[in-house]
Amino acid sequence: MRFVVGYLATPGGADAVALGVRFARTLGAELDLCMVLPPDRVAPSIKPVGDFEQHLAAQAQEWLAEAAATVPDDVTVRTHVRIDDSSADGLIQEAARVEADMIIVGGAGGGLAGSYSLGSVVNGLLHSAPLPVAVAPRGTRNSTVDRVHEATCAIGERDGADVLLDTAVRYSLAAGTPLRLVSLVALDPTFGVLRADGDAVRQRALAHAEAVLESAKAELPDGFPVTSTIVEGTTVEDAVGKLDWQDGDLIMVGSSRLSAPRRLFLGSTAAKMLRVLDVPMVVVPRDQLGRDDLP
């Protein structure tokens, strides 16, 4: 198992590395720290002073070496520099090249959103990546937690929910971490016609939660720690805020129904969760992606 960490020599980059280490230790994975640089855009009519691209690549290698030095010895780490017009596309291409299972990035960028502030690169990945993307909230680098303690899966009834559940089950089984299934179906537009009837909403949510729990149990060994809960609230933020979170938790969400097949598209519900959460979020594409499908 390999994870590509999109690195910048910034606090957000350090957050991404810290989350990568946490995931690597939990799952026995290897890390590939990658910096994506823009190509040299010097006009042909202008004589460049030295080799700008080579100089920038050397500086990137130095930054990557410093970042790799912070990775504990029990985690295998490699570093890569890639030249690409788009940082998001460059990370996707690098993930394809090394056959990575996930891309990990830091949420500290532009555009404040709670403990996250998603910049253009992270936004690009969350709206186009063909494999799961994990986003580290601001300050992850300061945490003393070295492994994931519990995975929460926020699951509804939209297309792709079965893929999200399967991914969460496989992750928890591989990591040996408890799995908490959270139903936000009362907030799902699918049930808009029932919103005026609170009891009907709760009954529908309860039936859904029980079905999801049984489905998960069928894929997990007897006695594996898996629970299911229903969260109600006037808004997504209100509902998610009622859940108990500990340092070392993570949340897994599915891609929007608007996403293209086998591509991420951060949905409105997940985006609202980002405003109030301070735990890592893993966004999973709607469809399973095989190696042959990577770009």
Image: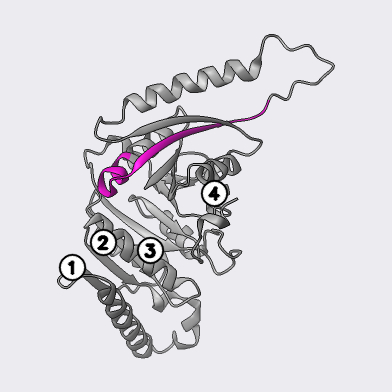
> How far apart, in angstroms, are the residues tagged by discs 2 and 3?
10 Å
Which residue is disc 1 drawn over? Answer: 224
Could you tell which of marks 3 and 1 lies nearer the N-terminus? 3
Comparing 222 with 152, the one in front is: 222
**Crowding at mark 3 (Cα within 10 Å: few <14, some 14-19, many 20+):** some
Which residue is disc 4 drawn over? Answer: 125
Amino acid at the residue labelled 4 = Leu
Query: x%, y% of residue 248?
Result: 25, 49
> How far apart, in angstroms, are the residues tagged by discs 3 and 1?
16 Å
Residue 173: image tag: 2
Which residue is disc 3 drawn over? Answer: 167
141 is within the stretch colored magenta: no
Mark 1 touches mark 2? (CB < 8 Å): yes
Mark 3 touches mark 1? (CB < 8 Å): no
Q: In this rendering, does residue 120 appear at all?
A: no
Region of the chain picked out in magenta, as a range: 21-39
Secondary element type, mark 4: helix
Could you tell which of marks 2 and 3 lies nearer the N-terminus? 3
Amino acid at the residue labelled 3 = Thr
- For image coordinates 53% across by 46% down, the residue present is 96
Could you tell which of marks 4 and 1 lies nearer the N-terminus? 4
Could you tell which of marks 2 and 4 lies nearer the N-terminus? 4
